[in-house]
Amino acid sequence: MLVRAVFWICAATCVTASTKGDAAAAAGPRLHNNQLYKFSYTTELLLDKARGSKEGSAGYRISSDVNINLVWRDPSNKEDQLIQLAISNVRIEPASQGSEKNNILHGSTTESILGKSKLAALTKPFLVHLKNGKTKAFYSYWSEPSTIRNLKRGITSLLQFQIHTGKVVENDVSGRCTVQYKAAEGQVTRTKFLETCKTSETGFTTHSTVLGVSRKSSSVTVFKLEDGFIKSAVAEETHSLAVSARRSTAAKIVSRQTLLLVGKEAGPMEMAGKDVAGVVKSIDDKLAAVGIVPEKLKTQCKGCPTLFEHWQVVQKQLEPASLSKATAPRSFLGFIQSIRKASKDEILKVLKSASKTTLPQVVDAVTSSQTPASLDAMLEFLNFTDAKGLVLQERFLYACGFASHPNEKMLTALLNIAKGKIGSTEIKESVVIIMGALVHKLCLKGSCDLPTVVQVKNMILEGPESTNVESEVQMYLLALKNSLLPEAIPILTRFAESEVGSYSTIALTALQRYDVHLITPEVKQTVNRVYHQNRRIYEKNVRAAAADVILSSNPSYMEVKNLLLSIGDLPHEMNKYMLSKIQDILRFQMPASKTIRQALKDMISHNYDRFAKVGSSSSYSGFMTQSPDVTSTYSLDILYSGSGILRRSNMNIYGSSQGSMLHGLQVAIEAQGLETLIAATPDEGEEDLESFAGMSALLFDVQLRPVTFFKGYSDLMSKMFSMTGEPMNVVKGLILLTDHSEVIQLQSGLKASAEFQGGLAIDISGGMEISLWYRESKTSVNNRAALVVTGNVTVDMDFLRAGLEVSFETEASLDFITTVQFSEYPFLVCMQMDKATFPVSEYFTRYESLPSGKSIKSRKGKKQLVPGSEFPLHQENSNMCKRVFESSW
């Protein structure tokens, strides 16, 4: 026992000794008394495209001499030091060599660029308190401009390091960051993990990864040591920002620092003093601990137009006739930037002066700005008690739904509108539906427990079972579909078995949007009951929606086998639809394909009788684009009634990037109860359905309020005789798709502002025509869009501004037309999905300017035409289209 005790005492002693040794080894740089260290210092900033450009980078280089000496050292701790730094011989020059024409600094002196007072402030000595290699305090003057203090902080960042290997959390000019040190003979390498840095300046970004901006950053500093202090320090920091969906639209920031020892000479003697504060005061009582973290810079735009002046310039580009051109979203993005700097009164002035035709676009821009002033202006401008203002009110609500970074205030505003008097039933529905979308986005940001979010959650969760009005139940179910709340799954599961077909369809399509791991065995059991009609007879479109949920939720072998066994016992067109669905999953290699292949090995499930069913219904998926950046797919599902009239048409477009999925577009057209028009017999379970046709759109993961073409037999007949063939507008407006803003604090003390925005001008319309004379029906979905994405990176130092813009733009159209001839059975069905030839343009702009007004700007671009095409569908459709076109001649 005594031996064991002695062993533990010895072990503890060794550990203690080791710990003390590590503490001693944790020392940083150590200056000698009576020594003046003379350094040359250079900081360089480069802004360019990610892959560089022939024109060279925008940016500049600041060079100077820096003298460093020890002022005071704690007698009891040699690592506790107060150091003085003095900058002199400052020079500013372009980062890239070019012609005099492209050199904004040509003919300028450092004093003329900085100004006499700023140059004097920069060359005024300042103090740094170092302890064990870490900066404890930075002493300078509050009277100095913030940009000057930040440059001094940049030099200070090269004095902070430790001379042993390890990972630590440090505070410096970059913020509070995790740092890795690697020590070797006479050298220390510092790697700063910039993604861990926490600063006071926070930006925002789009919630969707597919529409967002990615950033890759690195910061490495190599210190070479001599006699305990720095012989050289070389730092390079890079930040690359790229649009996820098109990574060639990218900008790169490179910041370099070099501190090189050029000589030593006798310097001032070390001062006596009890502590740092006393020594600093004795040197200059105006010196203050101004903090290591840089202050926010307040830049003022001299000569910039007011918001109203900006509006007068862009208003022609925001006329409805211009919305299909790229000039519309580009003007929209610039207008948003101006609105974000404007006051409520300035915004109201523009709203009140806009013409009737441009006002909806102004509402889009003001709402998309997402500032307190813009929201207050919109709430004051709109009168929700007036039913005549439906268009503007709905544009406001949709812009809220597409908001890139909504906050609690926006949700509170919508909640107050919902509680107040609303003149239009359609607007009441849209308010609640959009609140569901805002709840989803706020929960994604970790704000699910905010008081207003909790209140709205309770409202939409309790809503479906709190009313018997059909339109209100649908409203709450659509809000739950947008919210994607896990708590809503039991509610949606109950409504999936509803006797009302529209409730079941909404509930089932909502369940399909959830992550597979949230679809429990209980949910699957309910959905299977609906498909197999274990408790009641359901409409075909309800059963089709149930099948979609089953096949997209990691189905078991038995679930798939039961689906296969049902084929042959379904209504004719439902048989064909399910058969086409199974074949599409196998052809497109969807997740359920492996299980389906296993089930098809059973000849009872897989035989000629089941797989030879005829009909016109179909399901098809294909690729729109495939690239390293983004993959875009489309799917078309068409379900007909036994009489040949469209029952459901569903077009979807998805985008995926970096493992994330975005439901870009869904347009569903649904019709029922039209068999009486052609004296046909309705299918089972659909004998008593009211005549109805409508259209529903989901855009960028946000479900919008459905649009009704007609409802009821009398409405149907009046619409048929007044039908012009013109499509009905479903969504029209300007949408802020990408919205990324951040301030990047560079180790050199400079700040880079990065703003990436993507604007979309969109017009989605749909229509349905029925000709009893020719026994033909035609449905159409027309999509027109213009897209502009811009990325601006700017470094503004009051005395010199440098920046670049990368951008791309395109104008495109996509039409989906279905023609059905039901004069005979099987009826002829032709589906067409056409993409017109469209241009894609890319631009790169670099710019530099001085406060005097002198500026240079260069812009390069390239343009290409992407040929139009008709997206392929199954061969059976091609054969059918030939017959339809032949019969039309």
Image (cartoon, helix red, strand yellow):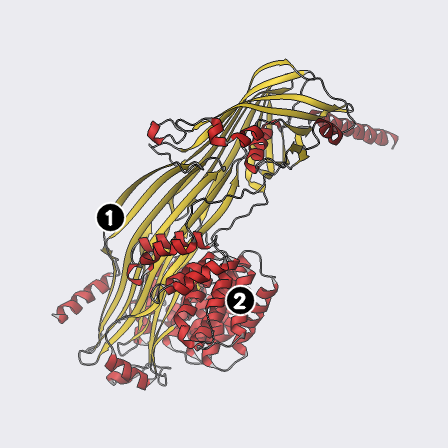
Most foreground residue, 202 or 320: 320
Any part of residue 705 in sight? yes
Any part of residue 603 in sight? no
Total residue callouts: 2
**Is 133 displayed left or right of 4 in the figure?**
left
Q: Local crowd at mark 1 within 10 Å, few (<14), some, or many (≥20)?
A: few
**Is 222 displayed left or right of 725 in the figure?**
right
- Image quadrant holding the C terminus, namely bottom left
Task: Residue at 16%, 65% (x, y): give it.
Answer: 882
Earlier-in-chain disc, 2 versus 1:
2
Q: Position of residue 797 (x, y in %)?
A: 50, 37
Secondary structure beneath dot 1 equals strand
Position of residue 199 relative to residue 320, above or below, is above
The residue most toward the right is 2
Three-letter amino acid code at disc 2?
Ala
Position of residue 429 relative to residue 847, above or below, is below
Q: Mark 1 = which residue?
A: 865
The CA span between labels 2 and 1 is 44 Å
Three-letter amino acid code at disc 1?
Leu
Most foreground residue, 658 or 575: 658
Most foreground residue, 18 or 598: 18
Secondary structure beneath dot 2 equals helix
Q: Quadrant of residue 361?
A: bottom left
- Image quadrant holding the N terminus, namely top right
Q: Position of residue 293 (x, y in %)?
A: 61, 38
Q: Position of residue 69 (x, y in %)?
A: 65, 21
Residue 446: mark in rendering: none
Q: Quadrant of residue 241?
A: top left
Residue 413: mark in rendering: 2
